[in-house]
Image (spheres, rainbow, N blue to C red):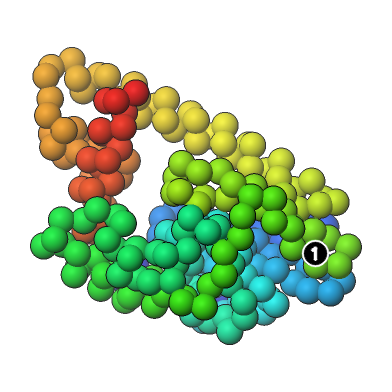
C-alpha cells in the first residue's frame, strides 16, 4: 500500500482548551483526526493518528477510542500511559490479535500484518490499561468522561469533555455517518435489481473506491454486504 508516514502533517483547530489535530488529506483514510485536551494538571491525547507520527504535542496520557490502525498509528511515539476500553484491549496490546480479529483469509494474514507494521507503525501496546463506561480522567479544571459506543468495534468509545461540552461534535459526525449508511443501502438495493452473491456485492464495492487495494478490502466489503443484507 505504501502510505507515507506522517510527520506533523496536521492542522490545528482550537476550541478553548480542546484542540482538534486535523489529519492530512482532509482526514481521508489512512489519516484520521486526533484530539488534544489541556487541563491545569495534565494534557491528554485521543487517537494518535498517522498524521502524528514523527511529530506531535507531548501528552501525559493517551486514550484510544477503538483498536483500529488509523486511530493508533502514532502510539509508538509516546512513552506515557495508554488506555482503551476493556473490550478492545487485546487487539491494542497485540498486532497478531488485531489481524486475527479482522477476519482476513489465511493467505492474506501475513500481508495484513506487514501492512499494519510497515504502513501504520503498529507494534502493539502490551502495557495498555482498560477503562469502562463512565470512567473519568480529571486533568485539572477539565474532565474527560468515557462513553461506551459499541458497534464499530466491541470497545468503541466516545469522550465527553467538560466543561466544554465538546461531545456535541460527535452528534454532527453521527448524522453524517447515518447519511453514508443510507447511501450504501440505496446503492446495494439498486445493485440487487438482479440476483447477486455476497462475493459479487463485495467486488462491486459498497465501502472502498475502486482504486483502493489491500488485504483489508475484501473482508470489509464482505462483512458490510452481509450486515446490510441481514438488516
Which quadrant holds the C terminus?
top left
State the residue lying farthest toward the bottom.
79
Percent coordinates x, y for residue 52 in the rendering:
54, 72
State the residue lying farthest toward the top.
193
Establish if 192 lies above or below 218. above
> In this orientation, which residue lies closer to the viewer: 226 or 118?
226
Residue under the image location 19 percent in, 38 percent down: 202
Residue under the image location 35 percent in, 29 percent down: 184
Percent coordinates x, y for residue 78 in the rendering:
57, 81
Q: Quadrant of residue 59?
A: bottom right
Establish if 98 lies above or below 173. below
Relative to residue 67, is residue 40 drawn left or right?
right
> In this orientation, which residue lies closer to the viewer: 227 or 36?
227
Dot 1 alpha-carbon crowd within 10 angstroms: few under 14, some 14 to 19, many 20 or more: some
* Residue located beneath label 1 in the image: 138
Q: Is residue 11 visible?
A: no
Which quadrant holds the N terminus?
bottom left
Residue under the image location 48 percent in, 29 percent down: 179
Q: Secondary structure at mark 1?
A: strand
Amino acid at each position: 500500500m505504501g502510505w507515507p508516514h506522517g510527520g506533523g502533517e496536521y492542522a490545528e483547530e482550537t476550541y478553548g482548551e480542546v484542540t482538534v489535530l486535523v489529519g492530512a488529506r482532509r482526514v481521508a483514510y489512512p489519516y484520521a483526526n486526533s484530539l488534544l485536551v489541556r487541563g491545569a494538571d495534565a494534557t491528554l491525547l485521543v487517537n494518535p493518528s498517522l498524521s502524528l507520527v514523527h511529530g506531535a504535542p507531548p501528552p501525559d496520557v493517551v486514550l484510544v477510542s477503538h483498536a483500529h490502525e488509523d486511530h493508533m498509528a502514532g502510539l509508538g511515539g509516546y512513552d506515557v500511559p495508554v488506555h482503551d476500553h476493556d473490550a478492545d484491549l487485546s487487539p491494542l496490546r497485540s498486532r497478531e490479535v488485531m489481524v486475527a480479529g479482522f477476519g482476513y483469509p489465511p493467505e492474506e494474514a501475513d500481508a495484513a500484518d506487514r501492512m499494519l507494521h510497515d504502513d501504520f507503525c503498529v507494534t502493539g501496546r502490551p502495557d495498555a490499561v482498560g477503562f469502562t463506561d463512565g470512567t473519568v480522567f480529571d486533568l485539572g479544571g477539565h474532565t474527560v468522561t468515557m462513553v461506551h459506543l459499541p458497534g464499530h468495534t466491541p470497545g468503541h468509545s466516545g469522550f465527553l469533555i467538560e466543561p466544554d461540552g465538546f461531545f456535541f461534535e460527535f452528534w454532527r459526525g453521527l448524522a453524517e455517518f447515518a447519511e453514508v449508511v443510507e447511501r450504501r443501502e440505496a446503492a446495494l438495493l439498486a445493485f440487487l435489481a438482479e440476483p447477486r452473491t455476497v462475493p459479487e456485492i463485495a467486488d462491486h464495492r459498497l465501502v472502498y473506491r475502486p482504486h483502493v487495494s489491500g488485504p483489508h478490502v475484501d473482508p470489509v466489503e464482505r462483512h458490510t454486504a452481509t450486515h446490510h443484507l441481514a438488516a
